């Protein structure tokens, strides 16, 4: 599970190399497209990492908070607190990796035409899970009220 806070940058640590789809290219020619779906309102946001570091067993994807969204530079604005579902898709290039509009798919279904070595291809889903986005600030508090223990025996009582 990923845990993050609203309106802040966060890093995603996920296992991608064991689930790798396109093994015919080097790790340097792979990037990951992250799809975030909110559980409450079903809104969807996409982002490539601002930076991405692929290790032997895991990948670190840095996501940056920015009110002006740019999925190609990993800048997104996830403001609705609560649970989100994430899906991470492998995108590979045969030639030079350029994560930009027209060279990198914007969604998991996006097919760039005409095909070229400089255009990324979505190879498939490598991992998925849940993310909890906590509130950064606000006045939502839980108010607890202590109750007296009931005197009768026909009650279920919880508490001190």
Image (cartoon, grey):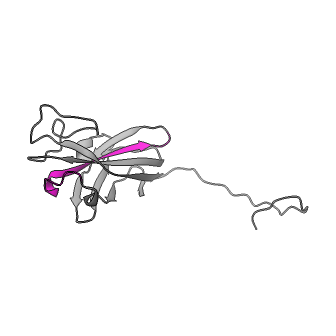
**Quadrant the N terminus occupies:** bottom left
**In which quadrant of the rendered view does residue 19 lie?**
bottom left
Farthest residue to the top: give it: 114
Q: Is 6 placed left or right of 25 in the picture?
A: right
**Quadrant the C terminus occupies:** bottom right
- Segment colored magenta: 21-40
Looking at the image, which residue is at 85% across and 58% down? 155
Farthest residue to the bottom: give it: 160
Give percent across and percent down for residue 150: 86, 61
Looking at the image, which residue is at 14% across and 52% down? 29
68 and 19: which is toward the camera:
19
Give percent across and percent down for residue 17: 25, 59
All told, the count of numbered labels is 0
Looking at the image, which residue is at 18% across and 41% down? 100
Q: Does the magenta stretch include residue 7?
A: no
27 and 49: which is toward the camera:
27
**In which quadrant of the rendered view does residue 66 lie?**
top left
Give percent across and percent down for residue 107: 28, 38
Q: Is residue 30 magenta?
A: yes
Give percent across and percent down for residue 35: 34, 44
**In which quadrant of the rendered view does residue 154 lie?**
bottom right
Q: Is 45 placed left or right of 18 in the picture?
A: right
């Amino acid at each position: 599970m990923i845990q993050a806070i609203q309106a802040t940058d966060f890093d995603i640590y996920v296992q991608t190399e064991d689930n790798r789809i396109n093994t015919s290219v080097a790790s340097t020619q792979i990037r990951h497209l992250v799809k975030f779906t909110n559980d409450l309102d079903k809104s969807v946001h996409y982002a490539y990492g601002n930076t991405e570091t692929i290790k032997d067993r895991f990948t670190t994807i840095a996501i940056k908070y920015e009110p002006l969204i740019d999925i190609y530079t990993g800048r997104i604005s996830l403001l609705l607190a609560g649970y989100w579902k994430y899906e991470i898709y492998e995108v590979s290039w045969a030639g030079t990796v350029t994560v930009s509009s027209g060279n990198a798919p914007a969604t998991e279904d996006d097919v760039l035409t005409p095909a070229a070595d400089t255009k990324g291809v979505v190879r498939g889903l490598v991992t998925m899970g849940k993310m909890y986005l906590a509130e950064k600030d606000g006045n939502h508090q839980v108010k607890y009220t202590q109750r007296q223990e009931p005197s009768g025996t026909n009650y279920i009582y919880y508490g001190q």
